[in-house]
């Protein structure tokens, strides 16, 4: 994956975001192997949902969880895509062995 450091993407408060096969990193932040693995899991999720589907579901789930939880950070951390990433980011081999559409199992809760 290509890594691009800049001051625009992602917005302040976020370290990195993956769009297509590119990791955009906030200037001044450093990426560890765990961070890159987290973003690689997002890339796998994006491919499964043909990219547009991933972002549509991500935004819809975020706002649904924001309505329920009324807390931006809690809503973000409870998104199924993020839950899969955070739970598995330490496993460097996760994307090699990952079940397709595994994020679905994180929708509960």
Image (cartoon, rainbow, N blue to C red):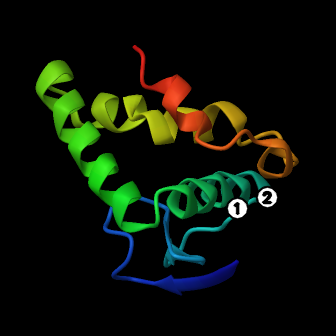
**Residue 91 at x, y = what percent?**
83, 40
Residue 78, placed above or below residue 31 = above
Query: Does residue 87 appear left or right of residue 78 in this picture?
Result: right
On the image, which quarter does residue 37 sit in?
bottom right
Image coordinates for residue 44, horizontal then vertical, percent: 63, 57
Q: Residue at x 39, y 28 (%)?
A: 78
Query: Visible in this render: residue 85?
Result: yes
**Relative depth, front residue between 23 and 107:** 107
For the residue carrying disc 2, how many other residues have a C-alpha within 10 Å: few (<14), some (14-19), or many (20+)? Answer: few
Mark 1 nearby-residue class (10 Å; few <14, some 14–19, many ≥20): some
| Secondary element at tag 1 | helix
Alpha carbon of mark 2 to alpha carbon of mark 1: how far? Answer: 5 Å
For the N terminus, give its image quadrant.
bottom right
Q: Which residue is mark 2?
A: 33
According to the picture, the residue beneath numbered tag 1 turns out to be 36
Residue drawn at x 32%, y 28% is 74
Q: Secondary structure at mark 2?
A: helix
Residue at 38% in and 70% down = 10
9 left or right of 96 in image: left
Asked whether disc 2 touches disc 1, contact meaning CB atoms under 8 Å apart, the reply is: yes
Q: Position of residue 86 (x, y in %)?
A: 60, 37
């Amino acid at each position: 994956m290509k890594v691009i450091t800049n001051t625009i993407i992602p917005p302040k408060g976020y370290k990195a975001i993956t769009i297509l096969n590119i990791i955009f990193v906030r200037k001044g932040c450093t990426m560890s192997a765990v961070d890159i693995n987290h973003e690689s899991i997002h890339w796998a999720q994006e491919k499964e949902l043909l990219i547009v589907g991933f972002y549509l579901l991500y935004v819809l789930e975020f706002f649904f969880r924001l309505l329920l939880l009324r807390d931006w950070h809690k809503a973000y951390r409870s998104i199924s895509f993020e839950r899969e990433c955070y739970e598995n980011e330490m496993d460097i081999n996760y994307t090699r062995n990952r079940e397709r559409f595994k994020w679905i199992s994180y929708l509960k809760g």
